[in-house]
Image (cartoon, grey):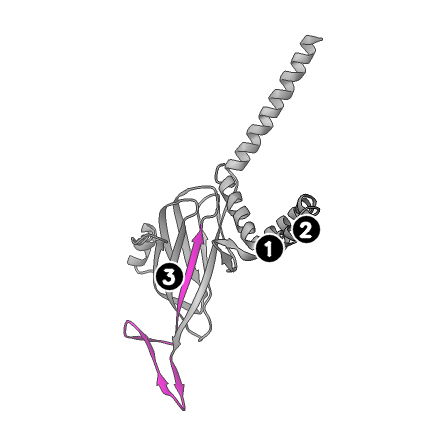
Amino acid sequence: MNDVTAVVTSTITALLGFFAHHLWGRFQNRLVQIPYYVFHHYVGSSAEDAVFGSVEIFHNKNKVNSLYLSTITLDNTSQKDIEDLKVVIYCDVDSRLLVSSARKKGEVSDIAFDQDFVERVSSGEKIHFLRREYRVPVLNRREQIEFQMLVTNLKGNWPRAWAGSEHAGVRLQEVMLVPTLWGEPRKTAAITGSALAVIAAYPLSRLLGQTHPAIAVLSAALLGVFCIVPGVVILKAWRLFRGLF
């Protein structure tokens, strides 16, 4: 009987170990999604106006129909440090990239173009008007890269820009800019803080409702009004916890 129990225990332990190893491998090799934000700032346009006269925009002595300062910001919110990351930024077919630069936020040195891209442009390919390719030696977790471009649109419309990557296991995902408080989404922080306020209201009423009802009501009211602050604290604590794994 003891032998059977030992065999069953060993088998179950081996199976649990196998599944744990399998899940850990899946966790380590899962697809990394890096969000990025796109922002276009209108600079000006060339135009003929009956009242204000002729307005012309030039870039390097060349007249352009319109001019925009476009910014793409990559934010590595994942729990991985990514090495040798190739990033491609590109625009729509009606727009042209006039000049671009890339650097990590908080650093002064620029990120270099990918060597293959430089060789293709040097050989005469006109691909640099629609796309730029960069090679990032390492993008650590919680680091951001900012790509800035001067863009013109041949039809006078707002340009469109995207970012992509050919790195295995990495996907760049465009997301909308959302209002933040201390680096955390305000809406998510408010919802989290509101849930905390609802949960804390009951024990507050039980502990202080009989002896100090005014303090209980005031504490619950303050927690409800300023719920976004504890919500931000909870989100930052969760990020810190995730960073341990």
Q: Which residue is mark 3?
A: 148
**Closer to the observer: label 3 or label 1?**
1
Quick one: which residue is furthest to the bottom in this view? Answer: 50
Of the numbered discs in the image, which one, if any, rests on residue 126?
none
Residue 54 falls inside the magenta stretch: yes
Alpha carbon separation for disc pair 3 and 1: 43 Å
Residue 148 falls inside the magenta stretch: no
Of the image marks 2 and 1, the number of the one nearer the N terminus: 2
Question: Which one is in front, 196 or 244?
Answer: 196
Question: Which one is in front, 101 or 241?
Answer: 241
Of the image marks 2 and 3, the number of the one nearer the N terminus: 3
Query: Residue 175 vs residue 109: left or right?
Result: right
Q: Which residue is mark 1?
A: 222
Question: Which one is in front, 66 or 207?
Answer: 207
Q: Which residue is mark 2?
A: 213
Residues packed near mark 3 inside 10 Å, few (<14), some (14 to 19) or many (20 plus): some
The residue at the point 57 percent across, 33 percent down is 23
Question: Which residue type does callout 2 highlight?
Answer: Pro
The residue at the point 42 percent across, 69 percent down is 41
Residues packed near mark 2 inside 10 Å, few (<14), some (14 to 19) or many (20 plus): some
Which element type, helix, strand or loop, lies under badge 1?
A: helix
The residue segment tinted magenta is: 46-75
Residue 204, position as x, y percentages in the image: 66, 46
